[in-house]
Image (spheres, coloured by chain):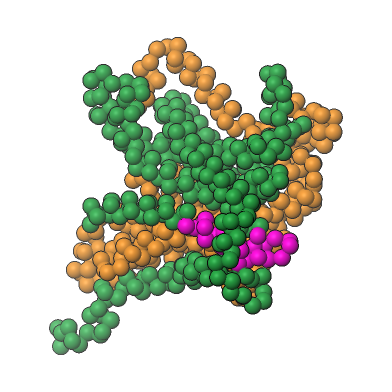
Amino acid sequence: MALATPHKRGWYKRNEIAISPWLFLLPAVLFFSVYVIIPIVQSFWISFHEWDGLGEKVWVGTDNYERLLTNDRKFGVSFWNNIRWLVLYLLAIPAGLFIALFLNQTVRGIRLYKSLFFFPFVISQVVVGLVFSWFYLPREGLLNAMLTFVGLDTINVLGDPSMATYGIIAAGLWPQTAYCMILYLTGLNAVDPEQVEAARLDGAKGWKMLWYVILPQLKPATFIAFVVTIIGALRSFDLISVMTNGGPFGSTRVLSFYMFEESLSEFGFRMGYGAAIAVVLFLIMLGFIAYFLYSMWQDEKGGR
Amino acid sequence: MFPTPIQKTSRSWQLTYQALLPLALIMWLLPLIAVAIFSIKPLSDFSQGNYWGLPSTFEGVNNYGKVFFESDMPRYMWNSVMITVPTVIGAVALSCLTGFALGVYRFKGNLLIFFMFVAGNFVPFQILMVSVRDLTVNMGLYDTKLGLVLFHIAFQTGFCTLFMRNFIRALPFELVEAARVEGVAEWRIFWFVVIPLMKPALAALAVLIFTFIWNDYFWAVVLTQGPGAQPVTAGITSFNSQYVAQYHLMSAGSIVAALPPVAMFFMMQKHFIAGLTLGAVK
């Protein structure tokens, strides 16, 4: 029998194309469920309990949320700081575009310049935080050395509750701007030269050219820059932990930091309350995630 | 090309631009340059208030020697390597499989699973923290490198899947179809047809994940605690409390901690940038 009929082939052989994707997906889906999907559900569940991480969980209903929203001053401070982060972090996008436009030339050594400008993004946020906290040091810091040099008063950025958060955001903008810059540099590479030439013949230049011809073509880059910047802003934790540890007087806390503090504080673990904070942060993020996915879905519909 | 190529502009602007470039770069990297200078200064410079002048003597060898031979830094560095490398291998391997499954097959739930990975990748870490910490403690993996590695692999699979799937989508599908007509088994198509075409994606993803994981701090403090398992990002804080206010040593320590991803970036620059953008901007 040289010709095997479909019946004689094994069950797997007959259904190979239907089964294969699931076999390929199995290990990753398993891993991802255990470490990402299930924990999200569990966090929701834990947020309705009081729990020290060791003993029994005690059901408290919506108590944690009521306390968060009605009489927790720390939560309010953290929430508004998150909003500050979100809004100010977006400055990385125009700043990155600006540097990208500045560097989008072909002169000697420009490649090295581009990589060196990108440098801050490759360094860990912990080191960025350390570097900036030394930069801001009231007596020894370079910032104040420069301020004195131009005849201004010295400032203690990280010691002043009204300035500290902005000081940290500035530190965060440094690597984030570098990231946006590289996205735009790649985007600019893909800009259609013929359109630019055509627009130039029509007399477009400078801002008009940028706004009507270049930016529309950079839309994919802008979208990614927007996504990574929003996520970066809401994930801000390392810098705060390293630079001020939430202080002075709790003025630099954000939700992600406050959650960590409540859950693993020296004064006993309050996992339930921490989980409630995390849920609030998650819900804020969910709005953005939904938007990102919706945009991706719109693109997908056009594809294969 | 936009903006107008410098070669087509006036001579004076060309000269200004050439002068502006290094100046802007120095401004941009000023905080880093300051730390680099700190790290080669002797202690006496700081006690005499010579913060911003040139180093009075070159103490680079001494300072870095202390970091390498008289502190826990080498252990932290080694931990980082032992956390980062397995994670890179694991996450890239898993996402090759998922990328292939989601990029090649059409089946119900394809897009749903894909979006699950993408959405999971965007989630704030804190929503996972309590459960993942609990899970790790229960498995007896708290304060071990393996505990961190397992979590990192799982979480990074989200991003890697996004990347790999989009890359495989962009490959010519006819190759897979031709192989099927020949009667090649699916896993052989994966191994012999698709994987060889994915080399650039593998390289890009590997450098990128290396940097992400090396620089992770949050999970390091949540899942580990002492020099036995902590990576260098977390170790640097205990290093700094060992040498409080000795800026020359703290600077040297920070530079050492930051160096591996920087070296990786400069060696694999092309792949790195492709990685950052290819997964997204095509």
Give the residue at the far front of this rendering.
Answer: A70
A110 or A27: nearer the eye?
A: A27
Residue shown at the point (64%, 77%) measured from the top left: A56
Instruction: Please say if A278 is above or below A185.
Output: below
The region drawn magenta spans: A262-283
Residue A218 sits above or below residue A265 on the image:
above
Q: Is residue A275 magenta?
A: yes
Would residue B148 be visible to someone looking at this image? no
Palette colour of chain B: orange
Locate residue B262 relative to residue A150 in the image: left or right. left
Query: Is A131 on the left or on the right of B45, as rendered?
Result: left
The location of residue A135, given as percent across then percent down, is: 68, 34
State which quarter of the image contains the N terminus of chain B: top left
Of the pair B96 and B137, the residue shown nearer to us: B137
* Residue occupying image coordinates x 70% and y 18%: A151
Does residue A180 appear in this view? yes
Find residue B29 and report its image quarter: top right
Residue toward you, A303 or A232:
A232
Q: Main secondary structure of the magenta part?
A: helix
Q: Residue at x 54, y 64 (%)?
A: B128
Judge by depth and name the residue closer to the eye, A259 or B142. A259
**Which quarter of the figure has residue B162?**
bottom left
Q: Which chain is green?
A: A
Question: Which residue sits at x=23%, y=20%?
Answer: A202
Q: Residue A160: where, in percent of width, then height?
A: 70, 37
Residue A129 in the image: above or below residue B126: above
Count the numbered circles shown. 0
Q: Is residue A146 above or below residue A243?
A: above
User: In the image, residue A130 lies at what x, y percent?
Assistant: 67, 43
Q: Any magenta on residue A117?
A: no
